[in-house]
Every structure is written in C-alpha cells, then in structure tokens.
Amino acid sequence: MESSFLGEIIVKRGLLPPEQLEEAIATAEERGVSLDTILVATRALEEKALVAALADELGLRFQEKVDVESVPEELVELVPINFARQHHILPIGEEGEVVLVAVGDPLETFALDDLRVLLKRPLEPVAIPAEAIDDAINRVYERKDEGALGDHKGAEEEDELQDLIDMTDEAPVIRWVNNLFYTSVRERASDIHIEPIGDKVVVRYRIDGKLVPWKEANRGFLPSIVSRVKIEAGLNIAEKRLPQDGRIAKKIAGKVIDVRVSTIPTARGERVVMRLLDKERVMLDLADLGFAKRELDLLKHLVGRPNGIVLVTGPTGSGKTTTLYGCLNLINTPDKNILTAEDPVEYELPGIGQVHVQPKIGLTFASALRAFLRQDPDVIMVGEIRDHETADIAIHASLTGHLVLSTLHTNDAPGAITRLVDMGIQPYQISSSVLGILAQRLVRQLCPHCRVPYHPTDANLLELGLQVGSPLIDELRRAAASTIVGEGKLTGRLPPPPPGSIEGEPREDGLIFFRPAGCDACGQTGYRGRKGIYEMMLLDEPVRREILKGSDSKAIQRVARAQGMRLLREDGARQVIAGITSIDEVLAATQAGEDA
C-alpha cells in the first residue's frame, strides 16, 4: 500500500498516535518495505483494521474473509495461481456481468487492470485482508487439483519410470504437492505423511502431536506424487527399493521452512514422511514453554552455573530439544564459546557453533564431544547421551570446568540415574557431575475461544492424583497463578469465566477446570498449540547420598519429593488448574505410575 496515503488515513481516523506512526514510517523506509507490512509485523495494527479503514476511505466493500464454497471455478480456471498469489487477488463472485474480486491492496490498480484483461469482464474490487485471500487461494486451487487427481483412472503402479516422469511434469501434480506445504504451514502441522492405503493416496498432518487425515488422491498418482517430492529433495527417483533421506528448503508466505524428507518402500508402494521446521516459530524464551516460576528459576540457576551436567529427559517428541535451545539462548553471550553436537541441527542459532553428527563417516556424539574439548568451549550441548563413551566424556568435560547440556530417553527424572548406571557410569561420577535433571512431556493447549469451564468433581481430582483437601492443591493453585499463558509476557491465569457459564455444582474450594469444545479457530479440535509439563529434580545432598547408596529410582524419587520435587502428573494438574489444558491431556501424557 502507498505509505503516505495510508499514513494520512491512520492519522485521520486516530488508529495510532502520531509518534508511533512516525516511528513505523522511519522503520519501513530503513528496511525498504511498505508501511502496512511494518504495522502488521510489529502488531501495531491488525491487517483487518488497516484494510477496513482503507476500504471505507475509498468507498469499497469490505469483508473479513472469503466464502470459498461460493467462488466460481470457471473464473478461477482463467487466473494463474502465481498471479493470484503474487498480487493477493481472487475472483470471488458475480453480480450480473460484474465480477467481484477480492483484493488485499485496493491501491494496486495494475493487478486489477491485468485481471480485467484475463476475465474480459468489468470488475468490482472487494477489500479483504491479504492473509484471508491467500488462505482462500490455497483452498480454491487445492480443491481444483484434488478433483483432477481424484478422477484419474489409469496409470497403475506398474507403469514405472517413463510415465512417472511425464506425470511429474504435469502442473496439477506439482500444484497438489505444493498445496500440501501451503496448507501444512497454515494448519501449523509438524509433519506430513503421504501413504498408499487401499486404492487411495492418503495424506495426514501431525497437528499439535496428533495425526489428522487431510486429503486423498487416486492411488494411480502415487508414483508421480512421490517422484515430485523426491525431485525437490534431490533424491533418486529411479530407486524405489531402498529408503532415502533428503531435505527441501521452502519459502511459504514469507516464512523459510526446512523440510526433512524420508521415503521407505512398503508392500503397496513408497511411503513419504516430511518433517517441517519453521525457523521463525521455534520458541527460544524459556518463559514461553509452560514452566511454573519455581521450576523456571531453578533451571535458569542451573544453566547459569560454570560447570556440571544438566539433563533433559523424555520420549521422542516431548520438546527436549526446544528446551535445550531455550537454555542456550538464555546464556548465549559474546563472552561464552558454545558448541553443540546434534542429530540433526534443527535450528541455526546465531553465535553458536553447531555440528551435525554423521555416524556413517565416524562423526558420532562421542567423537564430536572429544573434539569440542580441544576448541576451548565454555558450554557444550550434546543432542543425546546414547552410550558409555559419550556419557564418560560428558562427565569428564563437566569435571574439568565445562557446562554440559544433554538429553536422555527416560520416563522420569529419577530414571535418568538408573539409565546412566546401566551405561556403566559409577554412582560417585553421577553425584559429582550432574546438577539437575528435567523430565518433560507436551500437552495440547485448550483453545481460549471455545474452552468450556466446569466445577470438577472429587473423582476428577483423584484422576490427577489429588486428594480432596490436600495441601498440594493449594500449592498447585499458587504455582498455577505464576504460569505464563500463551507466548509473550502475559502472566497469570486466563480471564476467569462469567459465573453463570460454569457447568456443574460449585465447590467450596472454588476450583474451576476447563474442557475442549471446538470452533473454527482451532479446527473443531478444542485445542491450539502445546505447552510443557515438567518434573525438575535437583541433585542436592540428600539425593546425592541416595545415589551413592546405589538406591533404585523409586527410592531416589521419594527423597527428591521430600525436597520439593513435583511429579509430572502433579505439574500437569498445575496446568489444568491454570486453565491451560484438560484432564484428558494430562492423563494421556503421563503414566499411571508417575503419581505413585
């Protein structure tokens, strides 16, 4: 949008204080971008408010979103998808001979002139936020390509390479695959699964940790779909008998997405799984990860120590790497030399030396760690301690003045001690080097737009391991009040619900829980995003004495609890009390034995 005209509208309507507007204009000029881009990116104004003000000033219609179902397909056929995306423009309806056109920037008249030539009809612009138009473009063209792929009846799997290459060059298949990426980013998916099931190619997205069926195509298109992905990932399209791994770099809606591609042969054809890493979405602030104040302060204290080992434990996909990145970001200053060994490097952190371990060529965690000690490091992060050699070098590094951060695959914090002993590490080595162990899980976060409040029953409390009238409930309520909700610096609980909206019989203690409902904002799931639940075990003197005695994990756990450690399920109860997640999520993420 033209900056001076837009600035006049903003001042005229009092949307921003003049000094804030001047600062935004200066920033836009300095970065060489438009004023509206800066205002939306810095959240000074919502794009919806900007477009509505501009539409009112120009006397145009304004809508918040596009009704995708009413978009005429015969008009979309005439508009190249790249043109529509580049200019945020889309025909959305007809009124007699006039075509209604969604425009993200009503001042971009050249695009309207080009579209008028393409459609050969008079146009009437309708101002709609560009983000809503981009979403509609993806959905409309995706629907068109699904029809083309779903109606296909030929090209069986046996048709092999020549047909495969020919089909890969067809625009509908390319657009169909591209739409997988666009929609996965829009839906915040972490993985894309493409797999042959019956006579269909089924696509599933992993959203907030759950696999969700998304779209289908005729099975005959499987070779061309897989081949298209392989070409983008730089893989061998002729090799169908062996697993392959590759990477794709995508820029989608201004975001750089790193895609890890894995293919494996199955009895019914090749199966593809793609892991999406949005480099802008990684949370590098520990305060945003769902910690209560006590655990957050303890972790900050541990990673601020000059030497020792801090371990993060949990199963695959429990957010361990994100927590370690948050720790590194906290202590990443110019006076520290920080080195990491990862498999693979998920996000690049400025100012930190990151090494991608490659066991095939002998670059293992142990060999990388050994090399790091000759690089004068202050802090070392090892992606995972898998064997005695790696654990032994990590302990040696911590005892010679280095802070070591790493992960282990164990169910709880005390279990990490048993795991290290099983690797051949002596109890005295553990007690003298390990500072603390953090166990964690991820639970889905309730959608703030549709969560339903209710008064829990005594049975609900027992499910979480809470005895009615227990002092632990008051402790967890205090911890819940210190929990950070959502990203950013908003502290305290979410706004309390109106009294008349709460289901169930009121309780004397005033406890209110929430359950999922489902709305458009969360895709009818009732959840949006994920937070962590944590179990922080400090290796203080009582715990160290228990380790030196050779006690099992249950005995160590009892001593740690006496020193103030909260179990995973108890910390999950803290998130339930804070209104962030539901009982079902906590029970699904924690084992029954964890509340013993």
Image (cartoon, rainbow, N blue to C red):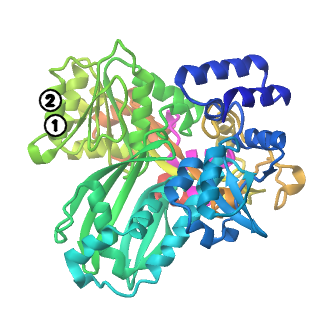
Residue 422: x and y in percent read: 22, 47
Amino acid type shown at disc 2: Arg
**Residue 146 is inside the magenta segment:** no
Q: Secondary structure at mark 2?
A: helix
Give above or below for 197 relative to 490. Answer: below
The residue carrying mark 1 is 366
Residues shaded magenta: 562-586
Q: Secondary structure at mark 1?
A: helix
Residue at the outermost bottom position: 153
Q: Are marks 1 and 2 in contact (CB under 8 Å)?
A: yes
Give above or below for 568 relative to 425. Answer: below
Residue 201: x and y in percent read: 40, 76
Circle 1: is it few (<14), some (14-19), or many (20+) Cα within 10 Å?
Answer: many
Task: Choose top left, top right, bottom left or bottom right for residue 70.
Answer: bottom right
Residue 51: x and y in percent read: 74, 42
The residue carrying mark 2 is 370
Residue at the outermost left position: 361
Say which residue appears at 47% left-offset and 61% top-offset: 179
Q: Camera-side residue: 317 or 106?
A: 106
- In 3D space, how far apart are the residues under numbered discs 1 and 2 (Cα atoms)? 6 Å
Whether residue 226 sits left or right of residue 211 in the image: it is left
Whether residue 463 sits left or right of residue 409 in the image: it is right
Give above or below for 329 relative to 204. Answer: above
Residue 464 in view here: no
Residue 234 in view here: yes
Say which residue appears at 31% left-offset and 84% top-offset: 155
